[in-house]
Image: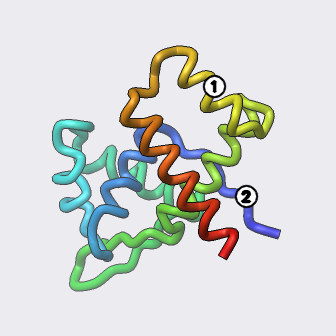
Amino acid sequence: MKKELKKLGDAELEIMQAIWSEEPPLTSVRILEKLKGIRNWPLSTLMTALSRLEDKGYVKCSREGGMNLYSAVVAENDYKAGASESFLKKLYNNSARSLVATLYDNHMLSSGDIKELREYLDRMESEQSE
């Protein structure tokens, strides 16, 4: 049975995306640089958020040379899979078809998106039949 991850808030997700975007470990200063323009926080606010992420089991902190170094404990794809499953279950009763229908009916899919989805599904189907 897979471990249920605690939900991330928007700011926590932005921090995780900054961490996932580079080779670990990252200093808090580097994370703050990556968030520039998205979150203009003082370092103390980031440190509080990183501490919460550590408590939730998303990051680990190690000390080296007087610096805190942060690494992701949860892989980006693992988080996305869990969040997607939860989203699909809560909003679409586990129906991918309903999700796509909503996107289509609300003109949120371009013809390019539809073509890309069709090619992806065709490729998945051919891989399954091999």
Query: Can residue 55 be seen from the camera position used here?
Result: no
Residue furthest bottom in the image: 65
Does residue 18 appear to the left or right of 85 in the view shown?
Answer: left
- Indicate the position of residue 38 as horizontal and vertical percent values: 24, 37
Does residue 42 appear to the left or right of 118 in the view shown?
Answer: left
Q: Is residue 106 above or below residue 87?
A: above
Q: Which residue is mark 1?
A: 101
Residue at (37, 54) in percent of width and height: 17
Tell me the CA gap for discs 2 and 1.
Answer: 28 Å
* Quarter residue 69 falls in: bottom left
- Indicate the position of residue 78 as horizontal and vertical percent values: 57, 63
Q: Camera-side residue: 7 or 112?
A: 112
Q: Is residue 77 above or below residue 86?
A: below
- Indicate the position of residue 19 as horizontal and vertical percent values: 34, 62
Residue at (46, 72) in percent of width and height: 60
What label sits on residue 4 in the rendered view? Answer: 2
Residue at (61, 22) in percent of width and height: 102
Query: Can residue 100 be seen from the camera position used here?
Result: yes
Does residue 69 appear to the left or right of 128 in the view shown?
Answer: left
What is the secondary structure assignment of the residue under circle 1? helix
Label whose residue precedes the other's in the sequence (2 or 1): 2
The crowd level at tag 1 (other Cα within 10 Å; few <14, some 14-19, many 20+) is some
Q: Amino acid at mark 1?
A: Ala
Q: Is residue 70 above or below residue 86?
A: below
* Quarter residue 129 falls in: bottom right
Residue at (73, 30) in percent of width and height: 92
Q: Is residue 91 above or below residue 21?
A: above
For the N terminus, the quadrant is bottom right
Does residue 6 appear to the left or right of 55 in the view shown?
Answer: right
